[in-house]
Amino acid sequence: MLLLDNSAWARLESPSLPGTRRDHVAGLVESGQLAVCVPFLLEAGWSARTTVHHDALLGELLQLPRVNVDAQVEEATLAAQRDLARRGHHRTASPSDLLIAACAHVSGAGVLHYDRDYDVLVELTDLAFRSEWLAPAGTL
């Protein structure tokens, strides 16, 4: 299972994204292997242009499996931020990215993204999850 990050979601319709990759993501959706969590849903909802767009967007996204933020995710998030701070990188990953990564860590999922912060989180914290780029960095 992969958790969706807004950096990937926002680029799914990019003309630079190969159709085969877009088809692969569609297959993940169809097989129930692409999931969301509240931090992503809040970012996606924040980007909505109108109330109608917000309702349609969230209605669509809430059909995907969801990983919940619980006490274990909260603790993992705080520990990861502490790990980054001790290395002088506490401003590297946004609070949303930290929460999404912690959701992936706790649930055993990966993260589908287009954002170097997830690689940094795997490298510099105790969060263990698969960091999967939507496309190679710098191509979209």
Image (tube, grey):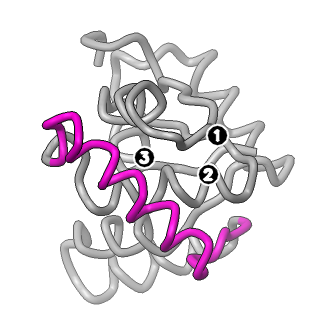
Q: Earlier in the sequence, mark 3 or mark 1?
A: 3
Badge 1 marks a residue whose secondary structure is strand
Q: Quadrant of residue 88?
A: top left
Q: Which residue is mark 1?
A: 110
Q: Which amino acid, by three-letter code, is at mark 2?
A: Ala
Q: What secondary structure is found at the residue carrying circle 2? A: helix
- Dividing the image into 4 quarters, which one contains the N terminus? top right
Q: Which residue is mark 3?
A: 9
Residue 110 % position (x, y): 64, 40
Mark 1: amino acid: Gly
Residue 96, position as x, y percentages in the image: 33, 61
Magenta part of the chain: 65-90
* Res. 104 mark: 2
Disc 3 element: helix
Q: Inspect the magenta stretch and tell me whether residue 89 lies in it.
A: yes
Q: Is residue 23 left or right of residue 101?
A: right
The spot of residue 61 in percent (x, y) is 56, 68
Residue contact at pointers 1 and 2, CB within 8 angstroms: yes
Residue appearing at x 25%, y 45% in the figure:
93
Q: CA distance from mark 3 to mark 2?
A: 16 Å
Q: Is residue 125 magenta?
A: no
Q: How many residues crowd around disc 3 within 10 Å: few (fewer than 14), some, or many (20 or more)?
A: some
The image shows residue 139 at horizontal and vertical percentages of: 30, 10
Dots 3 and 2: beta carbons under 8 Å? no
Relative vertical location of residue 33 with respect to residue 12 in this rendering, above or below: below
Badge 1 or badge 2: first in the primary sequence: 2
